[in-house]
Amino acid sequence: MSLPELFFTERQKHLLSWAEGGPVLAHMEDAETLRITSPAPHGEPRTPHDIAVTGDALLYAQASESFVSFALDGDRLDVTHHALDGTRHGWSTALPTAPRGRWALQDVIETRSATGGTGFALTVVDEDEEEGEAEGDTLLLVAEGAGTVSHRPRAIGTLVHWDEGAAVVVLREDRGPFQPQLHAEPLDDPARPVVTTEGRWLDGRDGEALVLTDAPGAPRLALWNLRDGSLRHPDAEAGPEAGPGPEAVSGPDGSSGPGVGPGSGAASGPVDDARFIGAGTSSALVVRTYEGTDRAWLLDLASGAAEPLDTPGAGRLLLRVATPRGAGLYGLSTTEGTSYRWIGPDGAVECAPGAVPPDPALTPPAHTYLGSTPALVYEPPGETTAAVIALHGGPESQERDELRWDGLYRELLHRGVLVVGLDYTGSSGYGDAFLRRPWKDWETAFRRDLDACLTALRDRGVTADRTALLGGSFGGSLALLGCVLAEDLAGAVAAAPLTDIRRQAARAAADDARYTAWFSERYDLASPLARQRTFDPEHLTTAGPKQRVVIVHGENDRVTSFEDSSTLVARARELGLPWSLTADASGHVPDDADEARFRHDQVRDALAAVLDLP
């Protein structure tokens, strides 16, 4: 199995728990079977066990470490717990009668029941509700041995938390491109106002919640009181010794490795994810990104003191599960491969390898500044013969060491290609001012970034004609723009790029009108000049006449337009430019292992052609 197929297959597995020094994982074996695999004790083989996917919903209950299936039968709900050891336990409960016909289950989340065990909150609708009546959702709280509690929410949104102790439910109102609104709605008194905050929901327990605020410019962890609506940022209470704040962009004239302790800045890097850990709400496991590398911290929510945890070799850390026994992380890195980590409530760390092994010939990337533009630089193990400037999508994202392009960087490095993962102006992770700086003038901002990068490469002996741009999604758009700005570049490979900003904005606004304001704030859509619109077919096809440009795009892309890319390439070829389009049947990103391998191979071969690699 190729590395792209191996990596894609592993990413589809769900980290559930930890046993015998390794991860307990689950994946869909087929459309009707969920397969659970556990580590082999003392090297002995252990047979996986399967769970039949039946009923109306299947949920992994983290508190009890079991899968739970739900089946509606009229006014009765049948619930079956499937423990990770293969044992089963079932129970049933009566539901209130639907007003007109039968309940249809829309969603289910885990909660804590008043009896002290695991409970579940169901979102149901009356399937016989007539068009135009719009009675909305009904929320039902069920638990074994307890009566059903019903609630009709006043606030708009999807249920994310039911807190019996605080007598509130929390609903998330999605707002398209903008941060969600979170509504904490009282259960016990209709006269009590709904309290609201803006941010991403992370976790809730005992009347308090972890929320990510101020994203994407300067994401911060907040503790939200569900009773009175007050919001507190625990990291602000740690004092100045915790390092620079989220607006800081340190070391613009030098390079450094990732910080690992308070005082280095890592403790105050942008928050990526967090969960309560252990009993109560006194501590949280927090994942922060600092200089392109994720670090895990144990945060005292009262004092704001942060203790760094031992997670070497993981460029990116994905927080996958949080149970009463601890939390599980999935790590991935270009040089170090993939791994699993388990964090105990006391901060103890266990580690096990993943499917992608380390590459001992490679060294981890160095975080540096090219002028004032941050970047991750991957050095080849031998002589450098060419360079690739890699541009992430978004734009409001950032470059991380996370096996980008399904391990393609590894192949490039072994072929003597230096890789620069560029956090161009407009990326997240470096403060709100850095993120907003290029709005409505992307060309000026990216010209400065690209010039600084090409100057640094030239100082290393790599000329522009031995340098290619590689980008995906919005990064692909910048790769095409780069060929306009620097005609001596070898060329570009753009995967699923945005190639007509006005058409893209119109399609997005047709689905959700809020995108009109989002696009208008960032791009000069109204300008009659193609150059000022920047991401416009007329402007993008003013690239150099000898630059090789390859666009790779899935015909079923629902994010950016395959048709727009086809039109752009046709225009370029009419102008005599050596551009080509490679199509596949995928969406915006590959949907299965075969598509992942095909996309990887097409991008690899396109870069080899652009750079004339042996």
Image: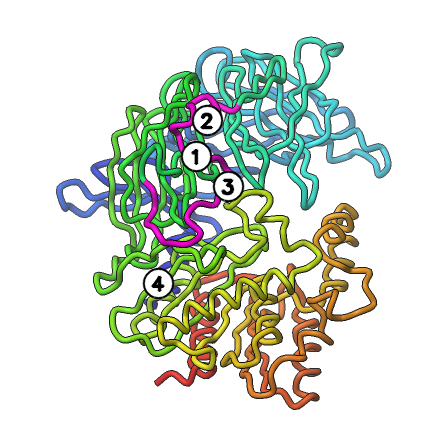
Spot occupied by residue 464 in the image (x, y as percentages of width and height) = 47, 78
Q: Nearer the viewer, residue 509 or 434?
A: 434
Query: Which segment is the magenta one?
Result: 233-259
- Whichever of callouts 3 and 1 sits on the residue coming sooner in the sequence is 3
Say whether residue 499 is left or right of residue 507. Answer: left
Residue placed farthest to the front in the image?
253
Q: Nearer the viewer, mark 2 or mark 3?
A: 2
Gap in angstroms between the C-alphas marked 2 and 3: 44 Å
User: What's under tag 1, amino acid-wise?
Assistant: Ser
Residue 485 position (above or below residue 442): below
- CB under 8 Å between discs 4 and 3: no
- Whichever of callouts 4 and 1 sits on the residue coming sooner in the sequence is 1
Q: Which residue is mark 2?
A: 235
Q: Nearer the viewer, mark 3 or mark 1?
A: 1
The residue drawn where x is 65% and y is 65% is: 443
Question: For the residue labelled by badge 1, is the local secondary structure a helix, a strand or a loop?
Answer: helix
- CB under 8 Å between discs 1 and 2: yes
Gap in angstroms between the C-alphas marked 4 and 3: 47 Å
Residue 263 falls inside the magenta stretch: no
Residue 458 numbered mark, or none: none
Q: Which residue is mark 3?
A: 54
